Each structure stands twice: as C-alpha cells, then as structure tokens.
C-alpha cells in the first residue's frame, strides 16, 4: 500500500503541473464533443489527435494524458446524442438510448443528461480506484482468460439478450440474429469464402460497425422524423428545467455501484469493451428489478447502468495495457502505439522505469473525471435546448452528422448508399415494433463469438470439449442457464400460488 501511495503522490505531482492540467481539461472537453458526434467515437478521436500530440513534441506523459482524456471524454460524451437524438455516439452508448431517449421525449432531457453525467463520473472514478489498488492482479486474471472462456462469456451475453429489451423476447432474439447475419458479411478470413456479398466488391471487406450503427439508428431516426412531418404529427419535444435530484441517485445507488464493478471487470478482459459491459449490466439490472422496473420507458436504473458500466470499462481496458503491454480495446491499442512511438515499452516494468508516465496517467484520470463533471453539468441546459429546435431543422442536422461521421472516417461513397439502405431497414424494423439495440449487439457480439470460437477450436484441433475445460467457462455457462430458466421457473411458481 505504501508503494501505491508513493506512486500516486508522484503521479499527482506530474498531473498537477499547469501544462498537464490544461491538457486534461482540453482532452476532456474535446473528447466530450467527439463522443457527442454520432459515429466518430473514441478510437477515431484518439487516432486523429495522436499525430498532432506527437508532432507538437509533447513529453510522453503529457501526450498520453491528452490522448487518455480524449478517450474517456468520448465515452462520457457518447450519451449526449443517445439521449437527445436516439443516435448512439458509439457502441458503448447503444444501451443508453433505451431509457435515456424516452426520458428526453417526455420533457426530462436535463434530468437524463445530468443523471447520466453523475453515473458516468461515479463509474469512471470507481474504476480508477480499482485500477490503482488491484490493476496488476486483475491483469494477470485477464490474460488467463482463454478463447474458450470468451466463448462462454459471449454465450452469457447472448442469454442476457433474451429478455433484455422490450416485452417480446422472440423479437429480441430475431433482432440479435439479424445482427449476427450482418456480422458474417464479407470474406471469411480462414477459408476465403465470400459470405452474403452477392457479388458486390465493396462488401468483400464486410460492413464497418460505424455504418451499421449510423444507418440503423441515425438514418432510421431521420426517416421516422420525415414520416411524422409528412403525416402532420411532427411536434417540438417539450423541455423543462429538470435536473438530477438526490432522490434519483439514492434510488439508483446500488445500480451504479454494481454496474461500475461489473463494467470494470469486463473492461479488463482484452477485446470485450464498453458494448459488452453496458449490455450485461443493463440485462442484470432489468432482471434484478423484476416487475418493479419500467425499463425501456425511461427507468432511471436503465440509464445509470450502461453509463456507469461503459465508463468503468473504458478505464478497465487500460489495466492490461499499462501492466502487461496488452491492449484491452481498439482505443487502448492506439494508446499502446503512442507509447511505442515514444520508445517506451508498456508492461510490468513501466511502473518502476517510468513512474511519471504510469502514475501520471492514473492521477490525471482522477482529475479528468472531476473535470468531465464540472464541464458537463453546467452545459446540461444548453444540450437540452437542442430539443427545442424545430424538428424541420433537427432532421437535416441528423442527416449532416450521419454523413459527416461516415465519410470522414470511411471515405467510400458506396457506404453512403449503404447507410441509407440500412436506415430504411431500421425504419421498417421500428414500424414492426422491433428494438434496434439487439441488432447492434448481435453484430458486435457475433464477431467476438465467431473469432474466439475459431481460435478455441484451432487450439484444440477441433475438439469441442475445450469449451468446458476451465472453471471460468463452466461458471459462465451456469450463469447463462440461470439467466434463461430462473425467471421462467419463478414466473410459474408465482402463477401456481395465485391459482
């Protein structure tokens, strides 16, 4: 413990210099704006800023503090467009749309934004404390996770999906299956076989996540608004001066703490990320709430769970990068590249050979979480006023954000037509009362599931028994079975008592 406290003292000495404080504030502010723009996301934001930070000749610790601020700032900002426009900023913010947007639609945008900001702050802070105290220990646990364990984790996540969204589990599973099918489009990397490309060369590389999320959410919302305008049902959404109340936080305190812990642990596992963390915590809270919840219609717990989890996961993803030199997510892979550009090798020796970098980064994250709250809470009213824009101005705004988000990252005109096609598909799904979140989660989890299943079977030479060879896998399969069958059994018992 003494070593940790000494390290933190060194770190705060680095983070409290005026230059690094300015970088923390700038990184958090810029990251919030990047996260609020649908489709850009933290990975692209950090990638754009990396050459600038390197080119300006910043010291390594300052460059890393700036890039990390962009990273968790973007995770923080992803909630804004999710709540206000029903368009998630990135994968981790998909679940935020489910309860955040209904709150905005009933005139509680300020309340939703401020509650999510506080939940994000608590999730991020809890994760930094856990990283400070248990980072190296958890990193060793994470690298012991084999591909077969990841398969079990994905099965657990799929099982959680069954009753995740809406009142119709069948529609949820159909939506997740559609997402799985979208994830398989392209050339199979192992066999070279083209899957669902229909002879279109632009589909051989598969469909980028960015295109799917912008098409299904952004463009589908656009078509929905156009339809309302055409039928004369278009109205300006009400906005009041609501703000977070102590009663809201007291009501959701255990949700926030549980989701922070689960989000951090999932974030530490390399390759999982905020999308898995937010999906698992949302499903967990919905099940724990039972009949007392109003999930999907603006339940505070449904908003707090994914927001606390995705910020905790973003911090957790840094643990294997700093302690073992293994990136926990796409964004931390870029941060790892940044360290290598400065000729610094991340790993167990980083804390002893370059304490100013490792502890300076950790200390800056404490300050960054406070900075995000200070920057964002006063702006809640300004963000909420976006909804007072007449909808005929809001419609082209969504279109412009969607097209800029796609073309600035992908740069292929074919993808612009693809998001329009996906938008029409998403609009039809909305008309049929399908939730779009399971489609996105099926798309994200499907890729992880397929890749890890292939790796596991390659290791075992095709022996499926490898999927049940560790206690982690068996525990996760048991949890998946419990998630599916326990509510059914409890429901039958309740019915039997009333008969």
Image (cartoon, helix red, strand yellow):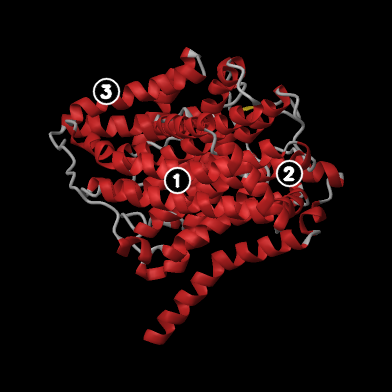
**The N terminus - image quarter:** bottom right
Q: Is residue 456 left or right of residue 267?
A: right
Distance, label 3 to label 2, CA atoms, is 46 Å
Of tags 3 and 2, the one toward the viewer is: 2
Where 25 sits versus 250, above or below?
above
Secondary structure of the residue carrying numbered label 1: helix
Q: Is residue 374 left or right of residue 123?
A: left
The answer, for residue 309, to whether it is visible in the render is no
Give me the residue at 58% from left, 45% from top.
315
Q: Could you say which is closer to the camera, residue 2 or residue 148?
A: 2
Q: Which residue in the protein does label 1 denote?
A: 370
Mark 1 and mark 2 lie on one chain; the one further toward the N terminus is 2
Mark 3 and mark 1 lie on one chain; the one further toward the N terminus is 1
Give me the residue at 31% from left, 62% from top.
246
Where 300 sits versus 330, above or below?
below
Q: Could you say which is closer to the camera, residue 396 or residue 368?
A: 368
Where 118 sits versus 63, above or below?
below
Of tags 3 and 1, the one toward the viewer is: 1
Q: Where is residue 107? Give x, y as percent.
A: 21, 48
Q: Which residue in the protein does label 2 denote?
A: 323
Q: Which residue in the protein does label 3 denote?
A: 396
Where 58 sits versus 270, above or below?
above
User: Mark 3 packing: few (<14 Cα in 10 Å), some, or many (20+)?
Assistant: few
Q: Where is residue 185? Give x, y as percent.
A: 59, 29
The answer, for residue 201, to whether it is visible in the render is yes
Mark 3 and mark 2 lie on one chain; the one further toward the N terminus is 2
Q: Is residue 33 left or right of residue 104?
A: right
Give me the residue at 85% from left, 47% from top.
460
């Amino acid at each position: 413990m003494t070593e940790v406290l000494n390290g933190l003292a060194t770190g705060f000495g680095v983070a409290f210099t005026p230059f690094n404080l300015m970088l923390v504030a700038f990184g958090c502010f810029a990251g919030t704006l990047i996260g609020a723009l649908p489709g850009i996301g933290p990975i692209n934001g950090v990638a754009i800023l990396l050459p600038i930070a390197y080119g300006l000749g910043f010291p390594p610790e300052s460059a890393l503090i700036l890039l990390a601020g962009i990273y968790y700032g973007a995770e923080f900002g992803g909630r804004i467009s999710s709540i206000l426009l029903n368009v998630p900023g990135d994968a981790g913010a998909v679940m935020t749309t489910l309860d955040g947007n209904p709150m905005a639609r009933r005139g509680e945008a300020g309340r939703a934004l401020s509650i999510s900001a506080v939940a994000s702050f608590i999730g991020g802070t809890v994760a930094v404390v856990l990283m400070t105290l248990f980072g190296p220990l958890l990193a060793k646990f994470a690298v012991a996770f084999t591909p077969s364990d990841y398969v079990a984790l994905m099965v657990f996540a799929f099982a959680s999906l069954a009753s995740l969204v809406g009142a119709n589990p069948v529609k949820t599973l159909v939506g997740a299956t559609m997402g799985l099918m979208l994830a398989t489009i392209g050339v199979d990397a192992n066999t070279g076989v083209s899957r669902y490309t229909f002879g279109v060369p632009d589909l051989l590389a598969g469909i980028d996540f960015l295109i799917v999320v912008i098409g299904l959410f952004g463009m589908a919302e656009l078509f929905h608004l156009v339809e309302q305008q055409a039928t004369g049902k278009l109205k300006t959404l009400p906005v009041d001066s609501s703000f977070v109340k102590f009663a809201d936080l007291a009501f959701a305190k255990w949700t926030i703490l549980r989701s922070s812990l689960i989000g951090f642990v999932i974030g530490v596992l390399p390759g999982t990320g905020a999308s898995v963390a937010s999906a698992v915590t949302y499903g967990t809270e919905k099940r724990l709430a039972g009949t007392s919840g109003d999930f999907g219609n603006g339940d505070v717990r449904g908003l707090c769970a994914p927001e606390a989890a995705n910020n905790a996961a973003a911090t957790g993803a840094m643990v294997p990068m700093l302690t073992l030199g293994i990136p926990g997510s796409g964004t931390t892979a870029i941060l790892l590249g940044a360290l290598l550009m400065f000729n610094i090798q991340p790993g167990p020796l980083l804390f002893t050979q370059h304490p100013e970098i490792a502890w300076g980064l950790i200390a800056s994250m404490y300050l960054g979480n406070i900075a995000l709250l200070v920057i964002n809470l006063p702006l809640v009213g300004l963000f909420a006023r976006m909804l007072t824009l007449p909808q005929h101005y809001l419609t082209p705004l969504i279109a412009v954000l969607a097209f800029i988000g796609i073309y600035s990252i992908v740069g292929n005109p074919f993808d612009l037509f693809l998001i329009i096609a996906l938008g029409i598909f998403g609009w039809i799904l909305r008309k049929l009362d399908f939730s779009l979140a399971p489609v996105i989660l099926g798309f994200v989890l499907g890729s992880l599931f397929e890749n890890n299943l292939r790796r596991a079977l390659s290791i075992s030479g095709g022996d499926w028994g490898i999927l049940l060879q560790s206690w982690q896998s068996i525990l996760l399969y048991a949890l998946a079975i419990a998630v599916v069958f326990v509510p059914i059994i409890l429901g039958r018992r309740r019915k039997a008592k009333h008969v």
